[in-house]
Image (spheres, grey):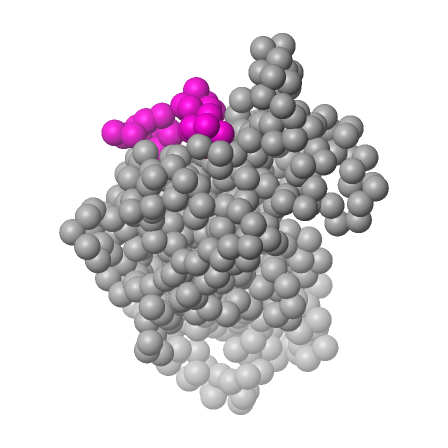
Amino acid sequence: MSNQQVRVRFAPSPTGGLHLGGVRTVLFNYLFAKHHKGSFVLRIEDTDQNRYVEGAEEYILDCLKWCGLHPDESPVVGGPFAPYRQSERKALYREYAERLVAQGHAYYAFDTPAELEQKRKDIPNFQYGHTYRNEMRNSLSLSEHEVDALLDKGEPHVVRIKMPVEETVNFNDMIRGHVSFDTNLVDDKVLLKADGMPTYHLAVVVDDFLMKITHAFRGEEWLPSAPVHLLLWEYLGWKEQMPQWAHLPLILKPDGHGKLSKRDGARLGFPVYAMNWTDPKTGELTPGFKELGFLPEAFLNLLAMLGWNDGTDQEIFSLDELIEKFSIERISKAGAKFDFEKAKWYNAEWIKRSSAESLKPHVEAVLQDKGLTIAEDKFLLKVIDLIKDRVTLLPDFYQQAGYFFQVPGEYDLNAIKPKWTDAKTDFFNELVSVFEASATWEPAELETTFKALTEQRGFKIGDVMLPFRIMLVGGKFGPHVFDIAALLGKQETINRIKIALQAFTA
């Protein structure tokens, strides 16, 4: 790194939900900036007014907040290079577009949408570039007088870059190394639209320059645009200030064939968005990792490991550890296959490693959503500690812990009835008497008492242990049964045995 302060940016378009690939781009930007004590900038690229979606910007901000990836500069927090919405910077882009036209590196194009559509029909794979530009209605094919007349009349027009012919454009990508492009294969991209808004190509270059961005991370799908951007940096005289680029590998479908999409998630039953997104036009809900029950720490951890590792076998990283260990050199060139089972493993590991105190608000929300009342915090914290090792997604806390807050509404009688006997009824009635007489109520003593009575009555432990568990929790699940009984307390355990006996013997 040079002495220049590192400045990176995430520049999403507010057009819908935030794909996990987008969050990974944010994460890699953030880790790189923080590793180098730099700044992370959020810039909203809302120049495409046709695709702008109401609520999408707020959604992006909410996603970053949930993930804990807080921008140093943004439309909300402000900063020295405000404004951070491109629509609010509209006035400054035309100046640069006009400068390019004056230099001969760009030109006015007056073709109507209908004329362009006709051209595409007439010529298969039509590209508005060096082959056909002189056949079109633009300032290269028209006389200066005609162009001035059209401009004076206010004729709708765009500004296009004039791609050079038979040149090679090169740059060094921080992940891919040397990359080169043949300019003949690139069309004359629109830089300024008829409504005066810049396209991504012009705006990203102007804003990266004005905001002093030093490193630009983006998905590899943007590689084909690189020659246009490289030339703009050169033509505007800013080549020395151009950020270093890193084009991140794609996140692939689970089978490795092609980029992971929203449709793949819907087809295979897992989310691909960070948080639930409801399309305001169609009302269609696309599920998110947050609402499915992922911890943000686990979500960031699994994203970091899609295409990066620290060179060891370590898989669980906190955000601070990721910041400390992150390096561009460890990002893979190859795409990373998304594995939802592995994603759930990360979440389970993070739940295991989290303190009961940090999990408490999540578990409270899950239980309250199911209508359960939580009597006291101390009891809830003990429950969380007892069962968190058995939980994969946060909603699992209801299935794994609901019985601590309510008597089972139903029992797995299929596991009980076929082998139930009067002798078992007598055993549990006596167990109630023994428990009522118990002076202590600790798991080890309860187990000793239970096993002694089992032996005395001539049962195998398995004959009565499963019914005891089902009496307390309703089914064949949960942690060690004497831990459950100890936590439920003496009176509640006895009450549950009595209630269940009525169901078992009915």
Q: Nearer the viewer, residue 352 or 145?
A: 145
- The C terminus lies in quadrant: bottom right
| Quarter location, residue 299 | bottom left
Q: Is residue 429 left or right of residue 324?
A: right
Seen at 65% across and 68% down, the residue is: 257
| Residue at (61, 80) in percent of width and height | 423
- Which portion, as a residue range, is magenta? 74-102
Q: Is residue 421 above or below residue 122?
A: below
Residue 394 in sight in this render: no
Please give the name of the residue rendered at 43% of the width and 78% of the height, measured from the top-left corner: 450
Magenta region includes residue 93: yes
List the single residue furthest toward the left. Answer: 3
In this view, which residue lies farthest toward the top? 153
In the image, taking residue 229 as reference, residue 3 lies left or right, namely left
Residue shown at the point (64%, 63%) measured from the top left? 258
Q: Is residue 405 magenta?
A: no
